[in-house]
Image (cartoon, helix red, strand yellow):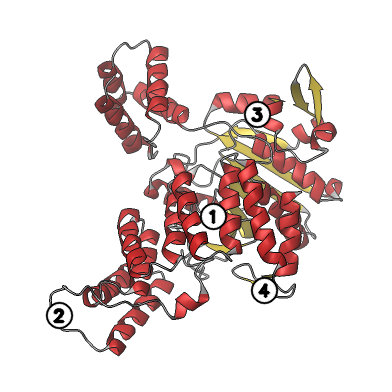
Amino acid sequence: MTDEDIHKITGLVSERTGLRVATGDGARLRKTVLERMRLRRLSSAEHYLRLLESDASESRVELDALGSALMVGESYFFRDKGKFQLIRERLLPELAERWKSRKTLGIWSAGCACGEEAYSLAITVREALPDLADWKIRIVGTDSNEEFLDKARGGVYGAWSLRSAPAGTIGKYFEEKDGQFSLVSGIKNMVEFRKGDLRKDPFPAPVGLPGEADLILCRNVFIYYERAAVADMVQKLSRTLREGGYLLTGHWELFSTPSELLTPRMFPESLAYQRVREGAKAPEPSFQAPYRPAVLAEKGPDLPAAIFSPPVSTPAKEDLETIYSRAEKYFLGGDYGKAIDALYAVLDENPRHFRGLCLAANALANAGEHAKARERLNRAVKAGPLSPEPYYLLARIAEEEGDSASAVESLKKAIYLEPSSVAAYLELAAIYENAREFEKARKARQSALSLLTALPKDEVVAPYAETAGKMILMVEKLLA
């Protein structure tokens, strides 16, 4: 099988299913395709391509099967310690207080794989709500892969799936036999599993929670899909949430897919999206938060154009600033097209206008133009070589695209330029933890803790709107 065959096959999958197939791991792609060919008893890539290209229902079935095989199904209990701490200590208490009169909560694990996340939610709910018996709690896990769902319903896992479980959890909620760990019935019965495909299923989603979900986890799913497919899925998820409910995704998976029904809330533990009232204006999830240093927001280094640039008729600086201010208003209003047009006028006159380059990158990224955004950010790096802001934004783009290695590299450069950034270290720790590099995550959090302990306890730490004293307690819990 040639590289061209692989390219054609993955291109068909993207075109027909909306999946964004990562081509970086060529060996895994080839192995997956060959396994599907073996199961179909097809000996050549040509025959397999014919099957995928046909209009027959069998083609649709095989495209779905191949797409599922290309998505990583491996997970583990309490993956992303920060998110579960956020759920246990902030979100669940807030939701419980909001609905204490009706005592009902709906929770959805979308893309639940083999059930580890859904059961982790059940354990967290049991730990967080002391009066659980008085509540009507519904936890639903959905996935498009029936094999994953069968394993989830069984509720039996190996030790590797429990490697991140909090101390005491295994002995309390699992029964061990011959190296396998079975969930106790009290947790197992809290979760129901159903087949569901976020891409194909119409709204309301077939989970029995339309407009009634208070908390949705949909993590590391969007990285597999093209922007248009992601936007469609986000609309479905947001309309399934009750007003005030929360959507948790993988780190910054949605930064360039804003929804008018969701507003981003930055917590020390993680980012969450909260459902707002229909018709209310949701703030744009701009790249600029949380890392944009306040001084740069006011005084970006507008350096002169190159010495050998052709002579141009340069308007007065006030004119450029007026145009820039107008672009900023467009951006904050969500009109990225007008913002980009205005910023092009600024950059035509001053190609090294630092704030113009960064804001243009923000607008382009929020419009889904990642390649163009990166180009502006690379120019911003040259225009403002001592500013960390472009690297923060480059990290966000890389994270949404599932390129954690590039995100880490950009964050390290940002930290080199701004060693006092607590947020950068916490973001770096979250990436490491998601990649199962737990020792690196621990060291990054320790660095954040050292920075926090050097601050006055009552100083508010941007962008979290929390004091250093509270932040210290939160990070210490993550390190426990």
Query: Eyeballing the image, is 421 above or below 183?
Result: below
Q: What type is the residue that disc 3 sits on?
A: Ala
Which residue is depicted at the point 31% across and 89% down? 318
Element at label 2: loop
Distance in Å between CA atoms under marks 3 and 1: 25 Å
Say whether residue 115 is left or right of residue 14.
right
Q: What type is the residue that disc 1 sits on?
A: Ser
The reply to whether the C-beta atoms of the residues labelled 4 and 3 are less than 8 Å apart is: no
Indicate which label's residue lies in the foreground, 1 or 4.
Answer: 4
Marking on residue 460: 4
Residue, disc 1: 238
Q: Residues within 10 Å of mark 2 (few under 14, many from 20)?
A: few
The reply to whether the C-beta atoms of the residues labelled 2 and 1 are less than 8 Å apart is: no
Say whether residue 297 is left or right of residue 449.
left
Which residue is depicted at the point 73% across and 62% down? 472
For the question of whether residue 103 can be seen, the reply is: yes
For the question of whether residue 208 can be seen, the reply is: no
Residue, disc 2: 312
